Every structure is written in C-alpha cells, then in structure tokens.
Amino acid sequence: MKKIYDVTYGESSVCKLDGYFPENKEFSTIVYFHGGGLEAGDKADKNYQEIAESFVKYGYGFISVNYRMYSTGAKFPQFLEDAAQAVAWTKLHIHEYGGNGELYISGQSAGAWISMMLCLNETYLQAVGVNPLEIKGWIIDSAQMTAHFNVLKYELGCDPNLQRINEYAPLYYVNSDAKFNRMLILFYDEDMPCRAEQNMLFIKAIKHFCEEIDLEYKQLKGLHCLGSCQRDLDGEYAYVKETLRWLR
C-alpha cells in the first residue's frame, strides 16, 4: 500500500487530504468526506483510516479529505467549494499514483450532505472544471436531504431541528433536470430524527422524475452512520461491505 499524508489541495491551510493506494495500477478511486456536523471530524480519524485500508485491500484508491468547517471559521458555501477542489485535485493527480481516473464520491453524514450537494448542484464542480457526469458513482452514508441543521443554525439563526427545503438542501435541486450516474444510499433504522424519512423522500422524489435512474438504497441496522463508525462482528465495516457489493 502506498500512502500520502497532508497534501494541500486548496488555498486554506485546512485544505489537506490523505491518499491510500494499492500497488497495482489502473485502480478506481473513492473521494471521501468525513462526518461531524460541519464542525467536527477529521480525515485521519481511526475509522476512516481503517475504511481506507479496507478499500485498498480490494484494489481501490481512497482519498480522505479535510475541509473548512464552522469550527475553523468557515461560512457557507466554503466547505462545498473545498470539496469540489479536492475532487478536482484528485482528477488531476490520481494518474501519478496509478489510478485510472474513474472517480466515486462518498461521505458520511455531513460529508454525505456535501457529496449530495456536489452531485445535485452542478455549479460547484463545474467551477473547478469537473462535469458531475464524469463522476462514476456516488456513495451516500446517511445524508441530511433537507437543509443541514448546522447551516440552519449558523447561517440563518434558526432552530436546527427544523426541516427546510431551500438552497441548503439536496432536495431543493431535485427536478426533471437532475442527472447523475449510479448512486448508493445508506441509512439506519435508528438514525437521527427524520433522517430515514428524508432519505426516502429524496428517493421517491428523484424516481418521480426519472424512474430508470440507477439508484439503490438500503436501510442498515443500528444508530446514525454505525456502518462507517464501528466494525461488524466479522471485523469489517458495513459501509465497506455494502459499497464493495455495489461497486461489483
């Protein structure tokens, strides 16, 4: 396994990424955004490192990304702009490490919300020269499909428990023009309040506009993002197992 740490991809000192790559050439790569409510979490947390190593074992590259958060003074949409820059960096440089250029975007919780916003609001990726349809697939682990609760809190001064569909919500961008390649959506039977329902609303809404869109979803057992926070009894993360099954 080849590893790179704390590579700068953007203008802010916070904009760093770690890369994990198999020794073989011509591998596909997952660009991953951590969770933590847009105010906590780190690319190098133990579970993300272990998830990265699992994907490398099965022949995939993995890019784990830090982005500006409210705890580092960020304002909307800086974390989305950072995420888009990380994707652009990967697209530009992954061949140097043996990648074939095929990219998947994924994230957990807040990172899943970031992924969904990049997918559905094409302006962020287009601003850095990436066509969202170039992304081979999207792997979404318990995203908030309404406006993110901390965006409501910090940007609008609202009660973060409110359910709002506005420009801060992936659901806001669901219409007949929404297009993406494959998507896997995971959520949990004991997820955060309204999270499972939000995901089902997104699935129903996008299917309303495009019945044939390649979208798979699965409700897993456990609490919010358990599948990417804790190993199963077999020693692997449920997020990894479901993603590998879907990728194959």
Image: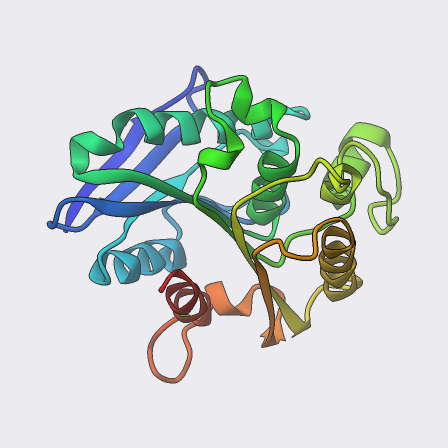
Residue farthest toward the left in the current orientation of the protein? 23
Image coords of residue 168 (percent x, y): 75, 35
Q: Nearer the viewer, residue 142 or 173?
A: 173
Q: Nearer the viewer, residue 58 or 34?
A: 58
The quarter holding residue 95 reads top left
Q: Quadrant of the C terminus?
A: bottom left
* Tally of numbered discs: 0
Q: Residue at (35%, 73%) from the top-left corner? A: 236
Color style of the picture: rainbow
Q: Residue at (78%, 54%) from the top-left corner? A: 208
Q: Residue at (37%, 30%) from the top-left corner? A: 16
Image coords of residue 121 (percent x, y): 66, 31
The quarter holding residue 214 reads bottom right
Q: Residue at (73%, 51%) from the top-left corner? A: 206
- Residue 232 in sight from this viewpoint: yes
The quarter holding residue 87 reads top left
214, above or below 2, in the image = below
Image coords of residue 72 (percent x, y): 56, 28
210, above or below 69, in the image = below
Image coords of residue 43 (percent x, y): 41, 44
76, above or below 55, in the image = above
Residue farthest toward the bottom in the current orientation of the protein? 233
Residue farthest toward the front in the current orientation of the protein? 212
- Residue 229 in sight from this viewpoint: no
